[in-house]
Amino acid sequence: MSFKNEKTVETKSCQKCQVSFNITDKDLEFYEKVSPVFAGTKHIIARPKLCPDCRKQRRLSFRNERALYKRKCDLSGKEIISIYSPDKPHRVYENSAWWSDEWSGFDYGCDFDFDQSFSQQFRELSHRVPQLSRYVLLSSESDYTNGAANIEKCYLCFNIDASRECCYCYTTTQLEKCFDCSFMMASQHCYDSCNLLNCFGVLSSDHSEGCRNSRFLSACQNCEDCFMCVNQVWKQYCILNKQYRKEEYEKRVSEILNSKSATELKQELEDLKLQFPKKSSLTTNIEDSTGDYITDVQRSQSVFDGHNLQDCKYCWYVYDSKDCMDYDIFGSHSELMYECIMAWDHAHKNAFSFGIWDGSTDLYYCSLMSACKNCFGCIWLKSQQYCVFNKQYSKDEYEKLVPKIIEKMADDWEWGEFFDESIAPCGYNESVAQDYYPLDETSSVEKNFYWSDYQSPAPDVTKIIPGSKLPENIDDIPDDILTWAIECEDTLRPFRIIKQELEFYRKHSLPIPKIHPDQRHLARMKLRNPQKLYHRDCDKCWVDMSTTYAPERPEQVYCESCYNKEVY
């Protein structure tokens, strides 16, 4: 189905934030398509009670990407690294034990109790069924990672694939020896950057492609040996968008680096960006679609970081999929997904679930399911069907029981909504929701999110040095800094420097960071616009545009046509 030419059939007030949002005729068609059928009767999914943003915020609160802890494996007793802090009530197994045949999800099966709510019973089941310590596949010498596959010698990297010898990277693929980088692909020897593609030796830059041996770039393409440039294409030996001869360029860059700190230069780059137009959205080959960071997308609305999508709505980080709505993070090769997160690999017609893969279909309110179909309220089953709360039923029994559970959930106002926030396996401040919908502890609790106050033990170090007292010159940093902790200038949280990191800083003559890796991550996140669309006029031709730049923001924002004429 297409979300093109939608017509509003109802305007509702979000029960969480009170913002008005519309239900369209296309939405109703979609709810009908993903609704389950039991014994020939379709049980229509209820219209959502929350606005799209609050629905997404709730889903994202279920995923801890970047918080890692030391704890014991509940099967072997050995110390492991996990996304679950030791105070969490969950049973947690190291990865090899969790994937093994030593145990089965059926070991924890139970009858549904109609005297209790679905949420209460699912929460109890999630505490009994062992959880996977980290989401990692085919990794080597990379214990401090999560959401990782095919990596080697990586440290504190998250959502990373096909990479080696990287540190502090987030949502990246095909990287080598990159540090403090986010949303990047196919790049080597880069540092402190965001949204780079096919770059080499690029430092402190953003939204650039095919560049080499450059620093402080923004929105540049195929540039080499450039410094502090914006919107440049096929340039070399440029500073502040001005052409220099090679010798002049090298001398001037050396003088600037010796006279100004990285913090000062970053601020100058931000000021410089305001002098040049921004493209309304970073999209390629889209048709009848809205969003940002998307390519090859047709007839889709409000989609972000997506590729090869058709007829999708309110999706983020999804690719090669169609007919999906309210679907986030690693969604791939899937169809008819609704209110799901972390569901991939040919999943089909699933709703209100997280962590499902290998062609799973017709799953409702499930978690961690592989190659399963026709299951309801289950956790970690493999190649099973007709199961409820991890208990096996015949097809007839299943189709009689589930409608009764749905009726009970409807009476409790649970049917048609994603899992209640209280079921989330991590604290709001540990979840990816905090990156996109930041809250303080008070606001989090007021919105019914759990807030984690667990503090990891202080690092065992020979001394702690405030970041402000670190020498600026990397040549003045002693080898034994590897045994120290650095106190973050912003938060006072201590953090360590590891050997491969120190070697990288020395090779590129970079100063030791003075702020905690989490704060550096947040700074890079600010280089990307919020995932919210506005109507705004092009500052060149005044055509109406859909963009992530709010109308009151100071940037010059051009439509694609005007931007291309200006830059190329």
Image (cartoon, rainbow, N blue to C red):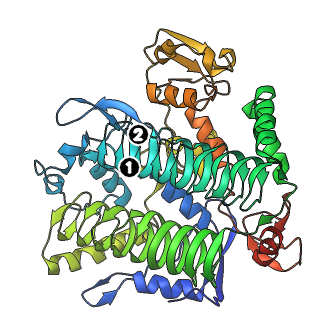
Q: Secondary structure at mark 1?
A: strand
Q: Quadrant of the C terminus?
A: bottom right
The residue identified by callout 2 is 154
Q: Hey, which quadrant is residue 39 in on the image?
A: bottom left
Q: Residue reaching furthest top?
A: 462
Mark 1 or mark 2, which has the lower sequence index?
Answer: 1
Residue at 58% in and 89% down: 25
Q: Which structural element holds mark 2?
A: loop
Q: Are marks 1 and 2 in contact (CB under 8 Å)?
A: yes
In this view, the mark in front (1 or 2): 2
Q: What percent of the width, then of the height, locates residue 88?
A: 36, 37
Give coordinates of residue 422: x percent, y percent: 45, 50
Q: Is residue 438 visible?
A: no
Amino acid type for the residue under numbered disc 2: Cys
Q: Residue furthest left?
A: 102
Between residues 114 and 434, which one lies in front from this camera angle?
434
Question: Residue 492 lies in what quarter of the image?
Answer: top right
| Residue 130 tag number | none
